[in-house]
Amino acid sequence: MDRQDWIDQFQDGARQSAPFHPLQNFVVTREGPRGARLSATVSPCVWLYDSTLQISVTLVGGGTTIVSDTNVRLPDITEADVVRLLDTVRLKKCTARGCHNPAFDPAFSSRHRDGKCEQCFLTRLGTELEKLQEAEKKKLAKMDRFYMARGFTHRADTWIHADGGDRQLSVWLLNPTDRAIRDELVRAGADAAQPYTLHPL
């Protein structure tokens, strides 16, 4: 299931579980420049939390942005409000060099893609992730060499899930048992039942 499928499934579930409103299933579309097509629906949070108007605008072919109007609350939302908000969304040429795809103009909608089309944004994100992963691999390899030179035989890795975000935790051991690994991980801040992976050095 890709990201858009997950979003669609979440929105469908939210619409089904929330109290019914005539605009829950309302979808408005319009054509944009560069052959683009925009589609807008009222965001599920409006039904779930009785909040002010917020719409999710999808650029067919990739990309979604959020537009809101804090002056209109759920009971007063009309189709005209959704259309009016959709009309505030502007598109421009993707800011990535050599790309001619349409992208959301960050001056008129959320800046989460900063003027890049979805494909270029995800490509850049993937490149940045690969660089971070490669740097982490080099760091671990250096630490492995350091500990192996001191007689350690294994590295145990686990992930700690905390409010500040997820982070990898690694400990180095000499011919460890499961109990020794778990004790060392707990001392380093992991939960006692946390799964781990063991790597020989």
Image (cartoon, rainbow, N blue to C red):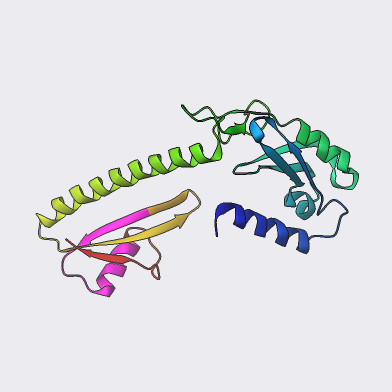
Work out whether residue 176 or residue 64 is closer to the camera in this orientation and state it.
64
Image position of 145 with respect to 81: above or below? below
Q: Is residue 170 magenta?
A: yes
Figure quadrant of the N terminus: bottom right
Q: Position of residue 82 (x, y in %)?
A: 82, 40
Q: Which residues are magenta?
A: 168-186
- The image position of residue 181, as x and y in percent, is 27, 68
Image quarter hosting the C terminus: bottom left
Q: Is residue 182 left or right of residue 7?
A: left
Residue placed furthest toward the front: 35
Residue 60 in sight from this viewpoint: yes
In the rendering, at what x and y percent does residue 30 appear? Answer: 76, 38
Q: Is residue 113 left or right of residue 58?
A: left
Seen from the viewer's position, the closer of residues 128 and 154 is: 128
* Residue 40 in the image, given as x and y percentages of width and height: 74, 43
Location of residue 166 with respect to 129 vertically, above or below: below
Q: Residue at x 66, y 59 (%)?
A: 9
Q: Residue at x 14, y 50 (%)?
A: 146
Point 15% across, 64% down: residue = 153
